[in-house]
Image (spheres, helix red, strand yellow):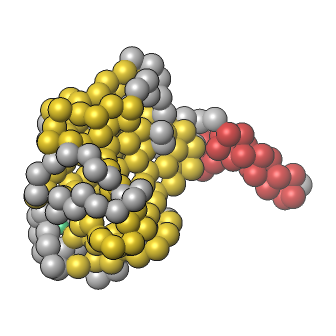
């Protein structure tokens, strides 16, 4: 029972510089193409290249609060219907999109074009979502904020455009899943185990 309890509300503290020989299993979902490459890096020797219409996904498994950040390389590609690329945590996202010369930041209460113009190079996208509210930052500048509790259960690095690809590097996440349905499932499993042993 002690083992079951300790597994419930652990804080996930994870960073990835994409320096390994293979994609870390922390990324428990890849849709499309995501490849480690030494063609470009924010730090170290490698980054991850998300190509075409693809997603690199980490499913937290339960709604939680925390902070998620990544560096994204913007090549200033502005074309293509439906084109977008960026960071998504639940319903919160910071991204570049078709025909938009500024970055966009979709918070808990509004979806806004920011005052931050797109420029070629590496940019830090950072989403903070806490019980007291949260904000979205681009290169250290707050571009959207809210004062309601908005949790997330999954994180996506995304790139939507069959004609291009996007580099991501230096991902970091601290998240504390809420002991909601996971706790109930764990208690159920532990109960079933005890019952079976008896
Ligand atoms: Ca790296």
Query: Which quarter of the picture shows residue 198?
Result: bottom right
Examine the rendered structure and indicate whether residue 156 appears above or below residue 131. below
Count of marks overlaid on the render: 0
Q: Is residue 14 visible?
A: no
Ligand 1 sits in which quadrant?
Answer: bottom left
Q: Nearer the viewer, residue 153 or 5?
A: 153
**Residue 4 x/y as whole percent:** 63, 48
**Residue 189 x/y as whole percent:** 75, 51
The residue located at (43%, 67%) in the rendering is: 54
Q: Nearer the viewer, residue 117 or 188?
A: 117
Q: Nearer the viewer, residue 53 or 129?
A: 53
The residue located at (49%, 65%) in the rendering is: 28
**Residue 26 x/y as whole percent:** 42, 63
Examine the rendered structure and indicate whether residue 62 appears above or below residue 70. above
Q: Nearer the viewer, residue 152 or 51?
A: 51
Query: Which quarter of the picture shows residue 163?
Result: bottom left
Q: Is residue 74 visible?
A: yes
Specify whether 136 is left or right of 76.
right
Specify whether 38 is left or right of 126.
left
The residue located at (39%, 59%) in the rendering is: 81
Outermost residue toward the bottom? 21
The residue located at (17%, 58%) in the rendering is: 76
Examine the rendered structure and indicate whether residue 36 appears above or below residue 146. below
Query: Which quarter of the picture shows residue 83?
Result: bottom left
**Residue 52 x/y as whole percent:** 38, 72
């Amino acid at each position: 029972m002690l083992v079951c309890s300790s597994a419930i509300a652990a804080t996930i503290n994870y960073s990835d510089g994409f320096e390994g020989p293979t994609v870390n299993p922390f990324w428990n979902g890849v849709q499309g193409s995501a490849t480690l490459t030494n063609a470009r890096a924010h730090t170290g020797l490698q980054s991850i290249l998300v190509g075409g219409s693809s997603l690199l996904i980490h499913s937290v498994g339960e709604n939680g609060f925390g902070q998620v950040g990544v560096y994204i390389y913007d090549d200033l590609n502005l074309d293509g219907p439906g084109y977008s690329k960026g960071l998504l945590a639940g319903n919160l996202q910071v991204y570049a999109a078709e025909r938009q010369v500024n970055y966009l930041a979709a918070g808990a209460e509004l979806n806004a074009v920011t005052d931050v113009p797109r420029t070629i190079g590496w940019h830090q996208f950072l989403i903070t979502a806490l019980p007291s509210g949260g904000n979205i930052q681009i290169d250290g500048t707050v571009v959207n904020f809210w004062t309601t509790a908005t949790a997330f259960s999954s994180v996506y690095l995304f790139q939507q455009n069959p004609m291009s690809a996007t580099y991501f590097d230096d991902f970091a996440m601290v998240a504390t899943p809420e002991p909601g349905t996971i706790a109930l499932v764990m208690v159920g499993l532990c109960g079933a185990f005890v019952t079976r042993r008896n």
